[in-house]
Each structure stands twice: as C-alpha cells, then as structure tokens.
Image: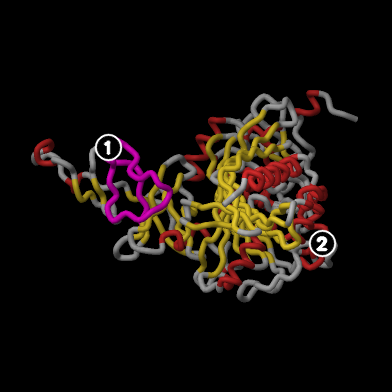
Amino acid sequence: MTTLEQRRTIEELIYRSCLALDARDYKAFLGLCEDDFRYTISAYSPEIRRDMVWLDHDRKGMETLFTNLPRHNSDHSPITRHATVYTVEVDGNAANVVSALQVFRTALDGGATELFAVGRFHDAVRLNGAGVKLAHRTVRLDTRLLGYGYHVPF
Amino acid sequence: MAKSAAEWNTPPKFPVTHFVDSRVYTDPAIFEDEKEKLFRPSWIIACHESELAAPYDYRLFHHPSGVPLIAVRGDDDKVRAFYNICPHRGNTILYDPSGNAKRMTCIFHQWSFDARGNCVDISRAEQGYQQRFCKEDASLREVKCETGYGGFVWVNLADDSPSLAEFIGGALDILQPYMQQPMEVFHYHKAHVRTNYKLWHDTNSEFYHDFLHYFNRITGMMQPGYFDRRYTGFPNGHATVGSMQIQYDKYEGSKDRAVGWPGLATGGWYMVDLFPGMTYNLRTSVLRIDTAVPLGPNEVLIEFRGLGLKSDSEEERRQRVFDHNMIWGPFGRNLHEDLLGVHGQGRAMREGTGSRWVIQGREENATIHDECGMRHFYAEWSRRMGRAAYDPYGEGRPEPVRVAA
C-alpha cells in the first residue's frame, strides 16, 4: 500500500529529475540517482517490428556522456520535460513509477516552442528511510522522428 | 576583404568541376527533374531481407520518386515489389509500415491481391462488370526487385533499367568479404531534415568535415595513416573510401569493445556511397545503411538502419547496439552533429537567401580530405540530368580549365 507521503516524495523525485536535466545541472541529476543507476531510452519500431534500445548507460556511462557534452557541436535549443506521475506502486523499499512525458523544444532564435517528443518514464525507485533515489530510468518513446536529433538524454 | 554583390555572384576561381551552383539544391523544377532522371531509373534500397523473414511479410517504402511501394515475400520465398495503389480507384492498399498479409485487401471496395501481385477477388465482380472486366485485368503494377549486396531488397521503377549488378558495378566489392554471413536489422529510425538530399549525400562523400566531429575524430586524425585513406570512384557515380583502424580506446567512453565484425580488423571502417543517395558504412561492429528519400528540394527523410549478424548471441547483439548508439543512434554523438551540419546548409541555401556556390575544390591526391568524392557524384549528376551542376541553366559559365582529379 502506497501512503500519500510516499507518493508525494516519489513525485517530487521525478519532478526534480526533470528540473535538473532541464537546467543541464547533471551533478544535481546524478545526485538523485543511486550508485548502480541505469538509464535507458527505448522505442518500438513498427517498421522493423522490433523493440530498439537507443541509449543504455550505467551511472559511469552517464557521467562520461555528461562530461563529453560540451566537447561536441550540439543544438543548444533548450528543452523542457513535462512529466505527470500516473502510477506509484511501492513494494517494501522499492517502487515502480510510471509517468507521462512530453518534451518541448524552444528555438533560440525567436523562442518558438514545439513539441519534440512524447513517451513515458518507467522508473524504478528505492526508498531509504526518509530519502528516495532513482535506481533505473527507462524512457519509453512513442516519438521516433526527432529531426536532427539532440545530444542530451530526455 | 569582404565581397561585393558582383564578386559574390562571380564563379569561384576553380575549374568548373570543382564547384556547384547552389540553385541545384533549391529549384523545385530541378528537383522534379531529379526524381525522373535520377531516382526513377536507379536501384534503390527499399528494406532488408530480415524485415521480410517469413512468407507474406511485407514492408512499405516511399520511393524517392514519390511512388508508394510494397515489398512482399511470396509463398515461393521470392521478394517482389508493387505499387501500393489499388488499380480500381487508386486507393492505398496497405497502411501499416510492415506486417504479414496473405491477402492484401483494399479497404475501400475489398479488392484483394496475393503476394505475386495477382488480383484474387473483386467483390460482386460479375454483377458489375459482367464479362467486360475480370480479376486478370486488375493485377498490381509490379516493379523490378532484386535482393543482394548484404541481403538488401532493391527496387527499380524503370522496366528497361540495367540489372542491379550492372548498376552497382564494382562499387561494393570492397565490402563483399564482410557481407558473407546473414545479417539482421536491429535499428531503424528516420530523420526529417529541411535540407536538400544531395547535401546529406555530400556529407557522406567527404571527410573534410572531420572538423565538425572534432572531439570524435581527433583520435583518428592524430593517427599515422589517417590522411592516407583513398577515394575510389566507380561508374554510375558510386565511390568508396578505404579502411583504417580507428583507435577507439583513445576516446573516453568507447573502451572495452568486445565484439567486432567477421574479417574486419579491430576498429576497421569502410564506406561506400551509392548514387544517388545511399551509403554503406561498416565500422567496427555495425553496418549502417543510409537511404535518402527526398520530399522536396529542401526537405529530406533519411532512413537509418543498423545491422548486426543474424547469428549474434544476446551479448554480442547488446554490444553492437551499444556501439551503434554511441556514434550513430538518435542520441549518438556523431549523427546529431552531421544532421546539424546539413540542417544549417538547408537554412542557408533556401531560395532567396543569396547562397550562390558550393566549393568542392580540395585536391589531396584523392585521399581522405580531397573533395573528389563529391566531384565524382556531380559528374554523374550532370551527365544524367543533361545539365552542368556548375551551370544548371546553361547561362554560360566559364569553360573548364582543367580536368578534376
């Protein structure tokens, strides 16, 4: 049984993870993650009728990715992640959380905002006393057409 | 000193083989001409055989000339291709991008077709058509289709075109030793970019943009021999780039590569650019295939496929997927940079921007930063189009002063 307090704490974790990534504050984002954190982006392709993994890193891999980001030529348009927590299922010290995700991209020149991608967060969360952390995030994308792409994970 | 309008509009001081009039990237009339003269009679990759593994498996393909196609494996295991257009009232027959259909039935009036293109049922045929029209009169339009060169399904809309082998010539010989085992597509995505399709193919045809990928490529450019790789041009506008071994272990985040490709040296890399808009790219542990589907003079849909071996173990496949995503995935460090590059060209080269010329003037003995790959493409483009890429409207540009390398 999930208590209201547990749900509130977990919802705040999900939303803080969005705020940290939106702000490109990768240190803050990793601060919300366990040491054995894993991050995956996946999608289903109806063209080849297969599940695809588009990104899969452990915590060290994410740290490397974040470190290398400024070394690449990238689109600098900011994106904002809008999450709505749908379900929270607590089982002892762990919880599975499903959230709707919409990602918007705002052009640097003129500031027009467009919907970039939709999908869901499937998060595995650990509850340790008063705190909660992300153990595994799978971003399951419905959107597969991402234009010229993006370097920063959703 | 910056240029005046007259100076900006004056052709670059290169041989005419070494620059292109940028209106070839923006003119809707030239684009329509390209669909007819370049894409319709060329062999184009529609899909891979692994996408049609079982009888009656089908795959839809939007042909670059604009024709919607169905590639379908028949009960006799042969892959055929047809217009995805019902011969009755011109409706779309199949909608899902892939599937399995023993009968392909148009939802409009339930005319039904088999995987050999025969019409097998016309609803209330006798009542409406009596003896005047029957199933035999209502077959699908079949287009030429061959499977080969790594198990890809190729289509050609021109009934009188040369064979696939004649079209490819020797361009894929360099990759044949590495395509002897059955392969499988594990990755597919598209990128929709507001740019001309040729600009994407150009990017795949020159390595001077190593500097766009500076952080990726510095490991390569620092290696002895990097600049010695050579371009080889083939008939019909195809070109290849020879291999080298990239020292990926020098790049943080790319270490511990456990899986390679049969016969390919560790870190090996071959590229083959096929006219008018396809690229084979075999690198380390993954074969990537690009297929450009132009939608307009300044709009292209690029299909990206990643392939491994059909015999892969779960761990081998996982490693290939990882290697692919690191460089070429939608969030990979290389692909976004390349797409940003051509997106920027698309912004700068739309009609009315004042863009005038694209210079392809580097000569380095046909090695990696020579721009002869692009020049080879535009020589074939000019031949097929019947108009010079440097002077597409016959306005009288300078005569060639020397022949391209």
Q: Work out whether residue B391 or residue B220 is closer to the camera in this orientation and state it.
A: B220
Quick one: SS at disc 2? helix
Q: What amino acid is labelled 1 in the image? A: Phe
Q: Is residue B105 left or right of residue A58?
A: left
**Residue B219 has which mark?**
2
Instruction: Please give the name of the residue rendered at 56% of the width and 46% of the height, measured from the top-left corner.
Output: A87
Q: Residue furthest bottom?
A: B263
Query: In what quadrant of the picture does the C terminus of chain B appear?
Result: bottom right
Res B278 visible: no
Percent position of residue B42, x then y: 48, 50
Q: Quadrant of residue B254?
A: bottom right
Percent of width and height locating residue B93: 33, 43
Q: Residues within 10 Å of mark 2 (few under 14, many from 20)?
A: some
Hey, which residue is sitting farthest right in the picture?
B1
- What residue is shown at x 57% (from left), y 52% (from top)? A1
Colour option used: secondary structure
Q: Which quadrant: the N terminus of chain B?
A: top right
> Dot 1 corresponds to which residue?
B108
Residue that appears at 51% across and 44% down: B38
The answer to whether residue B343 is seen in the rendering is yes
Crowd tier of the residue under label 1, counting other residues whose Cα lies within 10 Å: few below 14, some 14–19, many 20 or above: few
Q: Are marks 1 and 2 in contact (CB under 8 Å)?
A: no
Marks 1 and 2, the one that precedes in the sequence: 1
User: In this picture, which residue range is highlighted in magenta?
Assistant: B80-107
Q: Amino acid at mark 2?
A: Thr
Residue B131, compared with residue B161, is above or below; it is above
From the top left corner, tell me how far across and down residue A120 is, in percent: 58, 46
